[in-house]
Image (spheres, grey):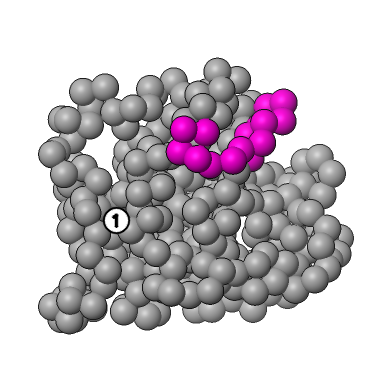
Amino acid sequence: MRLEGIHHITAITADARRNLDFYTRVLGLRLVKKTVNQDDPTAYHLFYADERGSPGADLTFFEYPGMERGRPGAGMVHRIVWRVASHDALAFWEGRLRREGIAATREDDRLRFGDPEGLGLELRVSETGDEPLVAMHPEIPEAVALQGFDGVRAYSADPGRSRRFLEETLGFAPAGAAGFEARGARRGSVYAYDLIARPGTIGAGAVHHVAWASRPEDHPAWRTRVIQGGGRPTPIIDRFYFRSIYFREPSGVLFEIATIGPGFAIDEPAERLGERLSLPPAFEHLRVELERALTPLPSPRAGGDAAVRRS
Ligand code: ZN
């Protein structure tokens, strides 16, 4: 039983319109689901990913309009790392970000920058043979596009206290200094720590949790294993697009284990993903009220997929 790397990463935005513009127009991801936070349906839950909405490429945001900026500290993820194919891709992104007025730092095989609310982002030249998870964008050639997550970096006051849980319970393998790899049969991701003891604050531009991907048939057993490892998972929660458990790892970072599937095509056709507000059946009766309350958002693919693919 192995986790298949990262399933999705969830962060917070105070400004869904700017967030949507940055992740779809600038970074070239596809909005694959526009839905609500199932624990607070008055807030958006936006999912950006590759063309198919694959686990391993989903970055999701809850929108809380006007929320103050967060500051990452101990027990929080502070950087999201994506794969790109080559140094040429890094050069492409360096130029594209510069033209957008976004400061970026190039360091050998990586490029670091922040999103409009200060969320730490990094592109890294991929060394894996994992399938690239790419979205189509008229200005971004496939050869330089983001290819899904390489991993995340978290802050901890004492990363050593997580080692046993990560290795023995979750099956992560040591990888470099204060780093681990969660690798399954098809895909892997890196989870690494940087030392910081000060506490952080959750808010706009902060990561809320990171979810690891489980085969659906293994999911109940993962919950049992987390309990045996000393974790305190929630019951299995049906999120409609996948099933989830949540718990904190010993350094305090909120983890989720989510099933690969059913996926985002369960309630809209694959070619129309993200175009309308998707509400799981339990929330459909709130549609009129929610459509009135949620920030109106443009559809990034208005004009149709054919126009997008013409690149
Ligand atoms: Zn989640």
Residue 209 seen in this snapshot: no
Residue at point 67% right, 65% down?
72
Residue at point 61% right, 27% down?
125
User: Where 114 sits versus 254, above or below?
Assistant: above
In the image, what residue type sits under mark 1? Answer: Lys
User: Where 169 sits versus 292, above or below?
Assistant: above
Provide the residue designation for mark 1: 33
Residue at point 21% right, 42% down?
301
Which residue occupies the foreground of this view, 51 or 167? 51
Q: Is residue 226 magenta?
A: no
Which residue occupies the foreground of this view, 186 or 50? 50
Question: Dividing the picture into quarters, in which one does residue 86 lie?
Answer: top right
Q: In the current view of this chain or complex, which residue is farthest to the top?
A: 88
Which residue occupies the foreground of this view, 99 or 23? 99
User: Where 124 sits versus 231, above or below?
Assistant: above
The stretch in magenta equals 98-112
Question: Dividing the picture into quarters, in which one does residue 226 lie?
Answer: bottom right
